[in-house]
Amino acid sequence: ETAPASAFTLAFTDQHVGIITIDVPGEKVNTLKAEFVEQICAVLQKAQQYPQLKGLVLISGKPDSFIAGADITMIAGCKTAEEASSLAKKGQSVMSHISAMSVPVVAAIHGACLGGGLELALACHARICSLDDKTQLGLPEVQLGLLPGSGGTQRLPRLIGAPKALDMMLTGRSIRAKQAQRMGLVDDAVPQAILLQTALERVAQGRKARAPLPWQARLVGGPLGKALLFHFVRKQIRAKTQGNYPATEKIIDVVRNGLDHGRASGYQAEAQAFGELVITPQSAALRGLFFASTALKKERGAGAEPLSLKRIGILGGGLMGGGIANVTATRAGLAVRIKDINHEGIRHALKYSWDLLEKRVRAGRLTRTEQQRQMMLISGTTDYSGFERVDLVIEAVFEDLSLKQQMVAEIEHYASPQTIFASNTSSLPIHAIAANATRPEQVIGLHFFSPVDKMPLVEVIPHAGTSEQTISTTVALAKKQGKTAIVVGDSAGFYVNRILAPYINEATRCLLEGEPIAHIDNALVNFGFPVGPLQLLDEVGIDVGTKIIPVLVDALGPRFAAPPALDAILKDDRKGRKNGKGFYLYAQQGRQAKKKQADPAIYRLLNVTPKQQQEGEHIARRCVMIMLNEAVRCLDENVLRNARDGDIGAVFGIGFPPFLGGPFRYIDQLGAAEVVKTLQGLQQHYGEHFAPCAGLVRRAQEGQRFYD
Ligand code: NAD
């Protein structure tokens, strides 16, 4: 029996430089695992025994990744803070071992260099990276509710200065080659073809004193500058996180600790904070989401091979059609044929993509040639020319059942017998759209969210007669478009809009009771939503956002009935931001808007005097509890395949607070019994629409959880 192959191999050049190749056996990308600690140390020891050693180069054996991060399953295995702390300390000691090498150690970086991967590169004496789109450097730990635990919080500020280091660690964003070079994160950025050679040349130059920090960074070196910086950063981050993300606070503390008391103290603080964060519910929730979305990305349709797709047809070049054309051409790289009844629709769709690409060209992220190449993928027509060759059609015409049925008939007439028909309807039943189809097994729902290029979620909605192959092909397309797809049941509102509607209704009820608009929205922002419900409605369009309500009432009952306020608002021609009239005031043309302000005319319209009566927490409880209750119904009625999909749908589709992990994980955290009790209390006060559903009551009685 042979020992498992090491992820690290060592070879020497004629110039006596050791090249350590990182290549985790059997994996597509390199990720760091706990057992590598011994392997790295063994390789370093072997190198040290080489008599004329001039230096070391670290390079990856994988095509697209240097090291994409640490394997987070090993973190999930930690039961206590101490256990997690000692994991961090192990990581720290390997990194110290590298930086204590007497010969120069240079990282040659191509591809993803994230988390533990960047910490490893930071421990080297120099970093060279490839000028390639795949090359990205970052410390994304904060997105999992953690901080870099292998010395990164200490080395990064010393390399690029505290302001930039804090920004990288607090946002988790990744940096591309050119910018990394500009900010001193890497010493050089060169074409991939000469990456290794450049790294070897760098070794030959020997150990160098580090270049001084840029003046902005030095400015904060003094006690006053430092105090100001940390005060400012903390204030800014609290405004963003509402104090809901403990990792951000700890990152700031630990960086400050190292700058005030030196490295040793900083490392100590880093390991301890890492341990404490690993066992927070916030980190558990964020890691849960990460695992769920990774699992969804890998998931294949049940049994049926997806058809291969080359050309996509789109019906309607409006707001949604334009966005869908864009992600299909630029993300999936597929040819797109748009059909609209008038040229305006086609012009709109083409301009929509052009403008988005233009932004990337301006930012230096896309070449003109590439912009033109991608635009060439999109073409338009006002008849069905070219549709005989499309493999799948996405329909985004007006929301009208007979029009959509007509679209099915026309596609069956003009396209091939294999062509799949996917409808982007937000409220019509898919089985009704397929009612007169000759090939109903090829009809499905594919529900995007606006703006299509930004919103990460789609709902895939088979009706009872949709074939497995149609499902798996549609899911595969959505993934290619860069979306996370959940497969949901063909019932009113599908999943996302069904849980969103009662939440928004409840917010409007609070408004009718006289709560100020800003107070309501702030309550939900403080709870952790990116925007409040009324502002959300303004953004989506009040007319569009409320369209689903009568559908839900008809199909599922009066608990979805909107308070009369919404009707009055719509009658007043208030559509939200798009017509400059909504819950908030919008700048008149030519005038600059100051801070977002509620439109006082709303209160007159609803005949209420705005006065803050309820605590923000209470308002948030009303809106959120009613959403949780509906989510459980969706699971029990098989609108959802599982709780995981429900959590992903709420977080990616609505912005449900990620640190709570989604509605189901949040119920688990509170306990079903507690949720039932709260709902019953609200029911007594506000009425039957708060009645806890049977499934929730049963789980409360049996002490059942959604996750183990
Ligand atoms: P839109 O009015 O912006 O665009 C509709 C387009 O369809 C127009 O360009 C129109 O000319 C074209 N059209 C109408 N009849 C046609 C026909 N017979 N053949 C070809 N083209 C035709 O509407 P939208 O907001 O893009 O919505 C489109 C669909 O997407 C609707 O079903 C809507 O419910 C759904 N949807 C909208 C949103 C949203 O936020 N707006 C979100 C999800 C889903």
Image (cartoon, helix red, strand yellow):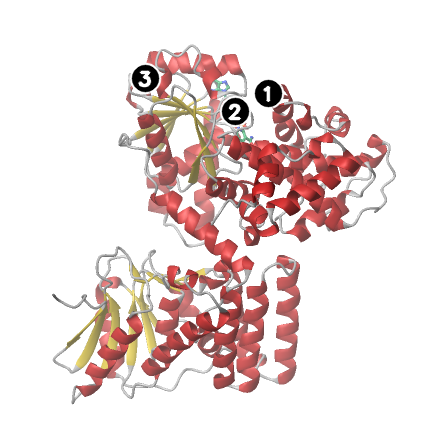
From the viewer's perspective, is residue 412 above or below residue 85?
A: above
Relative depth, front residue between 585 and 604? 604
* Mark 3 to mark 1 CA distance (whole Å): 33 Å
The crowding category of the residue bearing disc 2, from other C-alpha atoms within 10 Å (few below 14, some 14 to 19, many at least 20), is many
Image quarter (top left, top right, bottom left or bottom right) of the N terminus: bottom left
Q: Earlier in the sequence, mark 3 or mark 1?
A: 3
Q: Are marks 1 and 2 in contact (CB under 8 Å)?
A: yes
From the viewer's perspective, is residue 218 above or below residue 497?
A: below
Residue marked by disc 2: 491
From the viewer's perspective, is residue 122 above or below residue 347?
A: below
Residue marked by disc 1: 555
Left or right: 607 as drawn, with respect to 29: right
Q: Disc 2 on helix, strand or loop?
A: loop
Left or right: 170 as drawn, with respect to 129: right
Which quadrant would residue 14 be assigned to in this image? bottom left
* Mark 1 to mark 2 CA distance (whole Å): 8 Å
Q: Residue at x 42, y 77 (%)?
A: 89
